[in-house]
Image (cartoon, coloured by chain):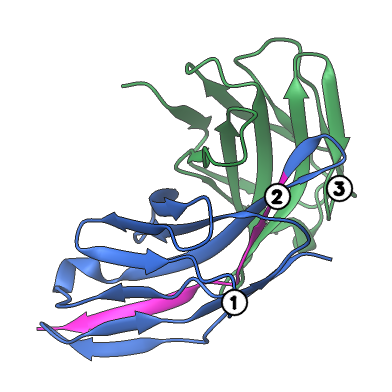
Chain colours: A green, B blue
Amino acid sequence: NAGVTQTPKFRILKIGQSMTLQCAQDMNHNYMYWYRQDPGMGLKLIYYSVGAGITDKGEVPNGYNVSRSTTEDFPLRLELAAPSQTSVYFCASSYNREDYGYTFGSGTRLTVV
Amino acid sequence: GDSVTQMEGPVTLSEEAFLTINCTYTATGYPSLFWYVQYPGEGLQLLLKATKADDKGSNKGFEATYRKETTSFHLEKGSVQVSDSAVYFCALSSPTSGTYKYIFGTGTRLKVLA
């Protein structure tokens, strides 16, 4: 099925470790986004991309990095994991139209201990 | 700046009850408005949308009307089911500096009892 695929679904990291959260979409969407969702809270934008080779910071970019070498893939890199990065991470994609809405992945639940 | 305010939950209803979840917004210009639903353990799914004033979005028995005069987009359903138990997010999208910026509310948890 077409959509946004995130891997892994679950991960436990130790403080100071690094990892990459993978996100891929097969809908040829220009825009891709990374959000984090803390318990009982809404979504906070980490980074977004308007096309291959172009990325920009959202509300909470510190501690994260992204790249967009292809239209399909938008990985999120965590360097030196901290307990404050324990969260559920969602990737989403969209066309560059304000009326289109997002397609979300199923999320990655990350725990930093 | 742009913002979305939702009623706080959780909202607990009996099956077949009427549902209203309030959402108001602040935005410059004329945003598009959305409701998303998140079932347990899943990502958000687009439920319905409205792109201009007085438009009514509808899907799966849910409805919401874009009210510019009251800057509101309240979600309603006439008869809820246990399967509607989820978290509902109101969101807006408006152009900012050549891109489209989406703003999400904090979500309202709905629990429907049999």
The picture quadrant where one finds residue A77 is: top right
Q: Name the residue under label 3.
A: A61
Secondary structure type for disc 3: loop
At 75% from the left and 14% from the top, the residue drawn is A52
Q: Do the residues at discs 3 and 2 belong to one chain?
A: no
The amino acid beneath tag 1 is Glu
Magenta stretch, residue numbers? B101-114
Given residues A37 and A99, the one toward you in this image is: A99
Indicate whether residue B104 is drawn in magenta: yes
Give the number of the mark in front: 1 or 2. 1
Q: Quadrant of the N terminus of chain A?
A: top left
At 76% from the left and 18% from the top, the residue drawn is A68
- Label 1, label 2: how far apart the Cα atoms are: 17 Å
Q: Mark 2 points at which residue?
A: B94
Is mark 1 in CB contact (under 8 Å) with mark 2? no
The picture quadrant where one finds residue B106 is: bottom right
User: Mark 3 — on which chain does it sit?
Assistant: A
At 69% from the left and 10% from the top, the residue drawn is A70
The amino acid beneath tag 2 is Ser
x%, y% of residue A28? 54, 15
A103 vs A31: above or below? below
- Label 3, label 2: how far apart the Cα atoms are: 21 Å
x%, y% of residue B87? 41, 69
At 83% from the left and 55% from the top, the residue drawn is A59
Residue most extreme to the top: A70
x%, y% of residue A36? 66, 54
Specify the principal SS of the magenta part.
Answer: strand
Given residues A90 and B45, the one toward you in this image is: B45
Q: In this view, does A68 lie to the left or right of B35?
A: right
The picture quadrant where one finds residue B81 is: bottom left
Q: Name the residue under label 1.
A: B69
